[in-house]
Image: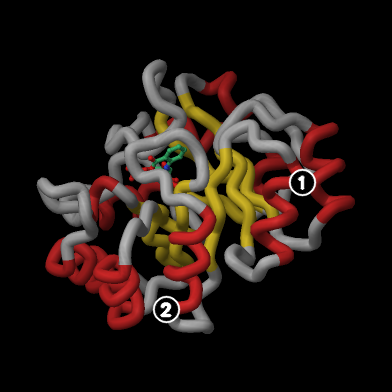
Amino acid sequence: MTKLKFCGLKNLDDVAICNELKPDYVGFILAESKRRIDQDTAQELRQALDPDIPCVGVFVNEEPETIQAYVDAGIIQVVQLHGDEDRAYIDKLRQLCQAPIIKALAIKDKDSFQVDLPCDAYLYDAYNKHVRGGSGQAFNWDLISARPDKHRAKTFFLAGGLNASNLAEAIRTTQPEVVDISSGIEGADGHKDYDKAKAVCQIVRSIP
Ligand SMILES: O=C(O)c1ccccc1N[C@@H]1O[C@H](COP(=O)(O)O)[C@@H](O)[C@H]1O
């Protein structure tokens, strides 16, 4: 079954939704964004969250030592790099901490997959010239079928504009190991919406 990541938790209400619905991962935005939370808030949310749910820290071109501090403090268990991080950056980060590393790629066209990085998983998100992620925009999923073999050997997360209305098609078309959703489970107030999150869970868990 496809795993589920709910990203962009900002407060204890968002955590309560996750503690009930139990996604496989949750994400904290620790980079420039309307969803950014500070370290104290991230610590508070981690402590309130079901200990069995790993927290993914989302960073954009952050100092590796800062990421190491989040891992060492037990605030995050997985690192998501959503900027221009290259092989040398990832090698350095690996020397500093043991957490699995997801590298996000902004997908514009078939050339967007032409990278080979020492990450544990790739995350494919829509390219947007204004924001690094969390745009609520989908990309052309047909591009994924032509990705290089080196990408196929790794786990991949599908992200970008997923919601209850397109999720089933997205999973059937691309067969990701994990689907990652932020905007698609938010209400008009920018907070996670229980009904939207529940609908997404039901869809993901109904597809074998
Ligand atoms: O969500 C953000 O604000 C964000 C900011 C900077 C980097 C990544 C961000 N979010 C990631 O974007 C994708 C898709 O989000 P959406 O479902 O389209 O809103 C997801 O991987 C988030 O982790």
Q: Position of residue 15 (x, y in %)?
A: 34, 71
Picture quadrant where residue 20 is located: bottom left
Counting residues from the N terminus, which is met first, the one under dot 1 or under dot 2? Answer: 2
Residue at horizontal 35 percent and vertical 44 percent from the top: 35
Residue at horizontal 20 percent and vertical 71 percent from the top: 198
The tag on residue 123 is none
Secondary structure beneath dot 1 equals helix
Secondary structure beneath dot 2 equals helix
Foreground residue, 15 or 22? Answer: 15
Tell whether 32 sits left or right of 122.
left
How many neighbours does mark 1 have within 10 angstroms: few (below 14), some (14-19), or many (20 or more)? few
Q: Does 58 sit above or below residue 12?
A: above
At label 1, the amino acid type is Glu
Picture quadrant of ligand 1: top left
Q: Is residue 206 in sight in this rendering?
A: no
Check the picture and name the quadrant holding the C terminus.
bottom left
The tag on residue 48 is 2
Q: Is residue 92 in sight in this rendering?
A: yes
View extreme (right): residue: 95
Check the picture and name the quadrant holding the N terminus.
bottom left
Foreground residue, 200 or 140? Answer: 200
Query: Number of labelled discs?
Result: 2
Q: Position of residue 12 (x, y in %)?
A: 31, 70
Tell whether 40 sits left or right of 36.
right
At label 2, the amino acid type is Ala
Q: Does 63 sit above or below residue 172?
A: above
Q: Position of residue 132 (x, y in %)?
A: 46, 29
Foreground residue, 155 or 152? Answer: 155
How many neighbours does mark 2 have within 10 angstroms: few (below 14), some (14-19), or many (20 or more)? few
View extreme (front): residue: 40
The tag on residue 65 is 1
Residue at horizontal 59 percent and vertical 48 percent from the top: 80
